[in-house]
Amino acid sequence: MSQAQGVMDVHSHIITPGFVYALESEGRVMDEGFPLPKWNAEAQLQWMDEAGIQTSVLTLAAPQPTSAQVVRATNEAAAQLCHKHPDRFRFCAALPLPDVDAAIREVVYALDTLKADGIKLATNALGQYLGAPELDTLFSVLDEREAVVILHPHRPEPVNREVMRQTPLAMQEYLSETTRAVTNMISRNVLARYPHVKVVVPHCGAYLPLAVPRMKSLTPVMQANELVGDIDWEANLSALYYDLAGAHSPEVIRMMLTITTPDHLLYGSDYPYVAPQVLTQSLARMKQYLTDEPDLAPYRDMILHKNAEWLLGLSAAKTAVGNLDGTMLVRLAEIEVYPEYLTEYLVAAAEIQQESLKTEPGVVCLFPTQMKEDSTQIRILEIYASQEAYQHHIQTAHFQKYKQGTLHMVKSLKLQDLSPLNSETMNIIFKRKN
């Protein structure tokens, strides 16, 4: 397949003349506080060729028109473009929310007739936020069809326009809006109740790496006051994928890895909202640090294209990290735990160690230790029989339980990949019995 050799961009926007005309007719061109950029397919293809992007996933830009007919026309235009350039474009269809019945009809038409790759959902549609009970019937349909959903922030509703005047939405409120929509879904167990829906969160996860630990720590208090019910953290968080559009960096990716795993990270550009030359430079910088940073290098191809290919069904199975050359993967996890959670964390670390070594032959060593001078400093020596064994490990139920269950306990995490000075002795060492 042609996609396998190039970057896959899961965050780009289609802005058709009909869409612009509809917004102009409704007087809503400036609803988001800034003008729509100019867009055409030829210009995007030219940029993709220059930047080294094989395939871009198109979604409708904000704001969303109120007319179901305009939404339908935009989806059909995207489908025609994908038919014309099947190796270069994919699309996720927009829905005419807040009309749930009309949205369900559009889901069926888009997925069955237009062969859309997924659905684009706004964080809110005229004040109807994701997570709202009236959207459960829509999510039931999406679940039946195992749909991929790409989120995008829209103007909060209602909104204080003075907030927009002081700080444009894209600079801050979009991040709040995304976090708000996702946490709404989590607090109502939407993704746990509809487990076949996979959701792509934009802009490096917004504030979720900060919000999730806070939510988990406050959940018992909220439950005691009957403000929320039981929350299945593992099921909800495992449904979330994250694009890296925006201010990506090695530090940001490491922070995101405190709430997710590397197979859930995807490249995104946000074309055409950022100048093409800036996006090209940004992608080149990402390729460079994903090559140079030892702890991130194993995930380079996963982030740039393999994860997206699997998510959208363009490859049959998840691929392993790095080259499957059979060599051992050796890593040191440097963890700092909040003192109040230390005892609980040590129990969880012992459980994941025992379960992994018991059930996974590819896990050669998981050896948690504490630093004597500071017991909150944990070091875990991890050795896997191969890159493939590591990839299998991070997808197991016991790893996901450990990962999600200890998020609020871990203050910092740094993964250091190690190179054995004499790799030939590795097998000898782990065959010794005493």
Image (spheres, helix red, strand yellow):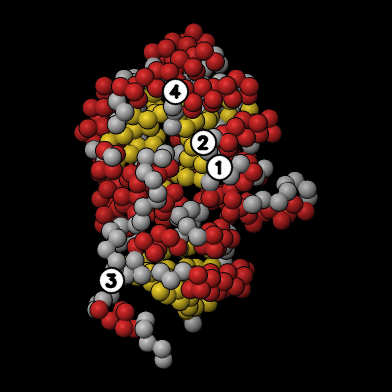
Q: Earlier in the sequence, mark 3 or mark 4?
A: 4
Q: Quadrant of residue 4?
A: top left
Q: Nearer the viewer, residue 299 or 27?
A: 299
Q: Nearer the viewer, residue 22 or 170?
A: 22
Residue at the spot 33% in from the left edge and 39% down from the top edge = 8
Residue projecting furthest to the right: 225
Give the number of the disc on residue 196.
1
How far apart are the alpha carbons under marks 3 and 4? 49 Å
Mark 2 neighbour density, 10 Å: few (under 14) some (14–19) many (20 or more): many
Answer with left or right where residue 27 lies relative to residue 331. right
* Residue type indicated by callout 2: Ala
* Residue type indicated by callout 3: Ser
How far apart are the alpha carbons under marks 1 and 3? 39 Å
* Residue type indicated by callout 4: Leu
Give the number of the disc on residue 114.
4
Q: Secondary structure at mark 4?
A: loop
Q: Circle 2 is placed at which residue position?
A: 147
Tell me if label 1 and label 2 are in contact, CB under 8 Å: yes
Tell me if label 4 and label 2 are in contact, CB under 8 Å: no
* Residue type indicated by callout 1: His
